[in-house]
Image (cartoon, rainbow, N blue to C red):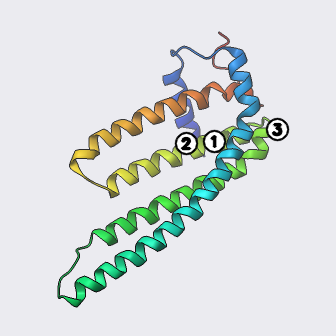
């Protein structure tokens, strides 16, 4: 937990000079982030089951293709296995993110610091997941744009996450502009 606190302080230092949202917006986000998180959890659970179904469908299709290739003494390559490894890794990260987000709903509703800390953990897991996804789908043409996209998405997410931090118990406000 010490390293997460250190990371929190570092990110907070980066965001300190950036203009802040009006106090009323921060307050609204802080009070309503719990149901936005709950909505995200519900939609993500639906997505997890949809992805599992799609993966089984793809596996059966790829199995059929491999069988047809096998009948003629050809191989279809290992692309299907690499795709499956990448998909399973993404699914595992998604399940972890959904679980942590679900645990955050009640503390967020009560505006406790624990809820915000869990959102910070979700933020970190999402960044790691994105980086792993870019690496597993390694393509020289998409590596740099993928990493740039991750950086931009992380910066935007961090901005909003740290803007609502002052709305949770035990947290001091970054700025009262």
Relative to 68, does residue 153 appear above or below in the rendering? above
> Which tag, 1 or 3, sits closer to the chain's start?
3
Relative to 147, does residue 167 appear above or below in the rendering? above
From the top left corner, tell me how far across and down residue 31 is, in percent: 77, 30
Q: Which mark is residue 110?
A: 3
Q: Residue at left 28%, top 68%? A: 79
Q: Which residue is mark 2?
A: 123
Q: Which mark is residue 82?
A: none
Query: Helix, strand, or loop for circle 3?
Result: loop
Q: Where the C terminus falls, by quadrant?
A: top right
Query: Dividing the picture into quarters, in which one does residue 33 lie?
Result: top right
- Residues at circles 1 and 3 in contact by the CB criterion of under 8 Å: no
* Neighbours of disc 1 within 10 Å: few (<14), some (14-19), many (20+): many
From the top left corner, tell me how far across and down residue 129 is, in percent: 46, 51
CA gap, disc 3 and disc 2: 20 Å
- Residues at circles 3 and 2 in contact by the CB criterion of under 8 Å: no
> Which tag, 3 or 2, sits closer to the chain's start?
3
Is 38 left, or right, of 91 in this rendering?
A: right
From the top left corner, tell me how far across and down residue 71 is, in percent: 23, 90
Is 124 left, or right, of 116 in this rendering?
A: left
CA gap, disc 1 and disc 3: 14 Å
Q: Residue furthest top?
A: 177
Q: Residue at left 51%, top 16%? A: 18
Q: Residue at left 28%, top 46%? A: 143
Q: Residue at left 40%, top 35%? A: 151
From the top left corner, tell me how far across and down residue 108 is, in percent: 75, 39
Q: Which residue is mark 1?
A: 119
Q: Nearer the viewer, residue 23 or 51?
A: 51
Is 16 left, or right, of 32 in this rendering?
A: left
């Amino acid at each position: 937990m010490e390293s997460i606190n250190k990371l929190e302080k570092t990110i907070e230092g980066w965001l300190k000079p950036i203009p802040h949202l009006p106090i009323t917006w921060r307050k609204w986000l802080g009070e309503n982030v719990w149901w936005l998180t709950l909505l995200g959890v519900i939609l993500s659970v639906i997505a997890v089951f949809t992805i599992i179904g799609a993966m089984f469908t793809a596996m059966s299709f790829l199995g059929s293709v491999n069988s047809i290739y096998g009948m003629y003494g050809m191989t279809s390559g290992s692309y299907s296995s690499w795709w499956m490894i990448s998909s399973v890794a993404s699914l595992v990260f998604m399940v972890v993110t959904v679980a942590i987000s679900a645990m955050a709903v009640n503390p967020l509703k009560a505006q406790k610091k624990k809820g915000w800390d869990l959102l910070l953990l979700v933020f970190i897991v999402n960044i790691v997941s994105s980086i792993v996804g870019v690496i597993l789908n390694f393509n020289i043409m998409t590596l740099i744009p993928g990493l740039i996209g991750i950086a931009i998405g992380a910066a935007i997410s961090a901005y909003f996450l740290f803007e609502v931090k002052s709305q949770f118990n035990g947290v001091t406000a970054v700025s009262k502009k």
